[in-house]
Image (cartoon, helix red, strand yellow):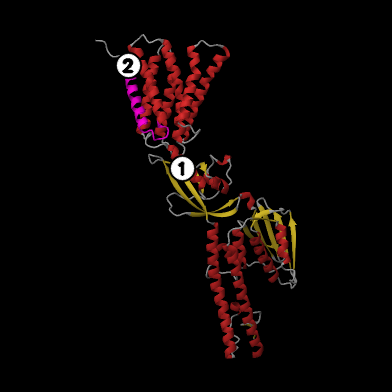
Amino acid sequence: MTGVDPLVVVNVVAVAGLSVVGGLAAWRRSVPGAGALSAIAFLTAAQPSLQVVVLVASDVSPASVRLFAVVWRALPPLWLGFAAAYTGRGPALGPRWTALLAVVAVGWQLPGVLFELTGLVRLFLELGWVLLFVATAYSALLLWRATDDGGLSRRRAAGLLGACGTSVALFAAVLIPDGGAVASAGLSLATAGCLAVAVVDGALDRAPGTDHLARERLLAAMDEAAIVADRAGRLSDANAAARRVFDLGDDAFGRSVAAVVDAPLPDPDNPDRETVVVDTPDGRRELAVSATRVRDDRETVVGRTYLFGDVTERVTAERRLAVLGRVLRHNLRNDLDAVQAFAEALDDDEFDDDEFDDDEFDGEPGERGGSRAGDDPPDRAATHRRRIRDLAAGLADTGATVAEMERLFSRPSVREPAEPVAVADGVAARFDDHAGTVRVRAAGSPDELVTDPELLSTALAELVENGLEHADDPTPTVEVVVAATASGVAVAVHDEGPGIPAREREVLVAGEEPLRHGSGLGLWFVWLAVRRLGGELSFAERDGVGSVVTLTVPDRSVAE
């Protein structure tokens, strides 16, 4: 009894496996690329079927085998159509275009089999091999890239890539004169096995192409900056918002995310969003950061995503409300208490020198409650009335400052071109009637920058007024120096006053606390304005007497 040829068994098993995969793919044809995969499986199954015929019936002519090998040229276009449709990457090849490419590939090689061709015609036909190789390599690349974002598991990718390589390798096996049967049987079985691995892993359940495209569209539409890091914490992807916020170029990819962002990154185990301050092309911004682990189908961590939401406006608004609440609560209470005390003293005709505290009501040296100890009662009554008028005027000024703050900060953020020197000249012109002098000096100032001109002008005017009002000299001089910086402009206000007390500066850094408050809203207004402009506020002592307050403001046209 003659035994069954092992090659026949191998080929039959391969045919059965490939036919099952082809049938399943045809049944699940709603999955993108399933139709092309079905054609691949059945076309590949034809090769071991032919080998069974050759092994059983030895009278099959070599010409028939070579003709069948020509039909094999359809595989690379089919793989290209499958990879493009399945992954959602590469050219948009529908079933018709894929079939047309397969027909062209076969037709290109057919004359070389039917006729004895030489010279340039033969060379032209041989170029088809190059194109088929390129199509196969590109198909493999598309499948491999689909694993980068977790859309295609590595096991499924390995099965599909293996099937792509082994099925196309059957080109050579068919043409091997001796030993080709063994190689062909092995490659056919390997192709069937690789496709089986991919199908078992869910290749026909859902294509990664939709996930990939949905993620890309979602990330592109997000206002928040989104960054994806790989296992090693290197930047692997970023949406348009992240590229804009962090000024990311192509050289940033592959670098550490922490280095690119230049800010501490949160732990994914922390459910709360942390706030970091980042220098961006739009100036200094406060970003709320959250981190999430990225897992593949087997729940293996393959990277992390970081979301950065710009909360500068919200945080600034919260601080503004907190400042207004605390400052007004303290100053308004003290001033109204003083008004009430002075009014009661006038009503009762009582002028006790110890009734009022110097520090509390800011009396002149030697005064108590705004009156001199040696004054006669009528003089002290006049002083009390003057103090009431002064306190009332101060409260009115505070109310006007609050109203101006609310008007400027409640409106949408403005970005308009402005000439920094012209803005400074406009501020100086406001104080033409003042006894003091306001000088503007340009030191390499930019001709124009994009900012909020009104907010910048109002903040600058507050500093100039502060310098004029607090100077010891009755005719003080305030100098405004406008200079260019790498990212915008720096406007420095030089005054001749006693300087900004360290306590006032600490309040701006530490925040307004009930027991550690500033004397008013002026510096707070400037600080909040500079924050909204995306800039920084700094203080320095002036040589001799006075102080220098510098507003550094970015050119927001860089961020557009």
Q: Amino acid at mark 2?
A: Val
Q: Is residue 14 magenta?
A: yes
Magenta residues, start to end: 10-34
Element at label 1: helix
Residue under label 1: 214
* Quarter of the N terminus within the rendering: top left
Residue plotted at (49% across, 34% down): 92
Q: Are marks 1 and 2 in contact (CB under 8 Å)?
A: no
Residue 16 visible? yes
Task: Count residues near mark 1 (Cα–Cα under 10 Å), then give few for <14, some for 14-19, many for 20+.
Answer: few
In the picture provided, is 114 more to the left or to the right than 57?
right
Image quadrant assignment for residue 332: bottom right
Q: Nearer the viewer, residue 118 or 383?
A: 118
Image quadrant assignment for residue 367: bottom right
Q: Is residue 501 above or below residue 76?
A: below
Q: Which mark is residue 49?
A: none
Q: Residue 507's spot in the image, x, y percent?
A: 57, 65
Q: Nearer the viewer, residue 314 or 263?
A: 314
In the picture provided, is 274 more to the left or to the right than 202?
right
Q: Amino acid at mark 1?
A: Ala
Looking at the image, the residue that sits furthest to the top is 59
Image quadrant assignment for residue 342: bottom right
Q: Is residue 70 magenta?
A: no
Q: CA distance from mark 1 to mark 2?
A: 47 Å
Q: Residue 288's spot in the image, x, y percent?
A: 50, 54
Q: Residue 340's spot in the image, x, y percent?
A: 56, 83
Residue under label 2: 8
Residue plotted at (42% across, 32% down): 33
In the picture provided, is 172 more to the left or to the right than 259?
left
Task: Count residues near mark 2 (Cα–Cα under 10 Å), then give few for <14, some for 14-19, many for 20+.
Answer: many
**Mark sitting earlier along the chain (1/2):** 2
Q: Nearer the viewer, mark 1 or mark 2?
A: 1
